[in-house]
Amino acid sequence: MTQDRDYQYDFSAFSAAMHNILAREKKAATMVAVLQDYFDVPLRTLDVIDVGASTGIIDAFLADHFGSVVGIDIDTTAIDLAKEAFHAKRNLSFCQGDAMHLQFPDESMNVAICSQVYEHVPNANRMMDEIHRVLRPGGICYFAASNRLMWNEPHYNLPLLSVIPRPFAHWYIRLSGNAPRYHELHFSYWGLMRLVKDFEVIDYTAKMLRNPKKYGITYMIKTNSIKARIARTVVRYAYWLVPGYIWLLKKPPGKIVVQQSVTGHLGSTSNNV
């Protein structure tokens, strides 16, 4: 899965979503809800690194719940905006940096955030190796990832863009006028599993769909709505077709275990620190 793509140095300059405070804070609230559900210690005792922090809105929200938060991004303009906007939070810091070469010591973090980032970096495998390196044994990566097998590509709002072969995708996106080439590279469910092979995978996708209110995702999917019922059916019977996943990736102290539920998709494990 090595790629010959360069970085997206100024992603925040053409992505309005990186500046949407309300939407970014909703994502951050979901992260907090999931991590509170998992950990049996106060979040205030944990250190967080956000890989792909962009403008820092998510990190500012997380800093109200965790002991310390550091956000990194290759996008210098976004990091400068974050530093200016959130300099008053004493447990929050930002640095311009490379997700594939994190500037932090081995086993120095309790929690890593990697939310909708893997498809943007030149080499997702190297990024996950770095996240694995900086996490302490038993540490957790909150991993939100889109599935290549999705109807609509969210970055450009183009149907089937991520599904078709890359040469056709480059032509398609040029024809649409969105970009000169298709930079993002999404993996299928099986590709994502290979990407996170060094971690124990704890699935939260199904749990969140069963209780959208608890995890703060009712703005996307209403409890007991037709959409929710369809989504739960897909998760149960065709997990590989779910358009997006929320996984907690645990760095194990020893042998790696990926647990399977009786329905055939990933199952959750007991809570750990």
Image (cartoon, rainbow, N blue to C red):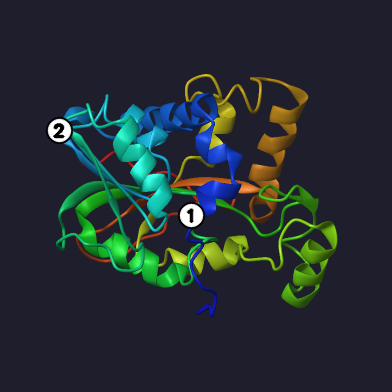
| Quadrant in which the C terminus is drawn | top left
Residue 43 visible, this orientation = yes
Numbered label attached to residue 253? none
Marks 2, 1: nearer the viewer? 1
* SS under mark 1: loop
Which residue is identified by label 1? 117
Q: Which amino acid does label 2 sit on?
A: Thr
Percent from the top left, x then y, of residue 80?
Answer: 34, 44
Query: Which of these two is toward me, 66 or 197?
Result: 66
Percent from the top left, x then y, of residue 172?
Answer: 82, 65
Q: What residue type is labelled 1?
A: Val
Which residue is identified by label 2? 45
Q: In this view, does 184 lie above or below 4?
A: above
Q: In this view, does 185 lie above or below 43?
A: below
Query: Going by the image, does 68 lie left or right of 30?
Result: left
Query: Which of these two is toward me, 256 or 101?
Result: 101
Residue at figure coordinates x 19%, y 50% from the top left: 109
Q: In this view, does 212 lie above or below 106?
A: above
Residue at figure coordinates x 48%, y 65% from the top left: 121
- Write down the quadrant of residue 182 in the picture: bottom right
Query: Going by the image, does 13 lie left or right of 162?
Result: left
First-in-chain label (2 vs 1): 2
Q: In this view, does 153 lie above or below 32?
A: below
Q: How crowded is mark 1: few (under 14 residues within 10 Å), some or many (20 or more)?
A: some
Percent from the top left, x then y, of residue 232?
Answer: 66, 36
Residue 262 visible, this orientation = no
Query: Which of these two is toward me, 2 or 183?
Result: 183
Q: Residues within 10 Å of mark 2 (few under 14, many from 20)?
A: few
Percent from the top left, x then y, of residue 253?
Answer: 19, 60
- Write down the quadrant of residue 127 in the picture: bottom left
Query: Which of these two is toward me, 85 or 133?
Result: 85
- Count of number-bearing discs: 2
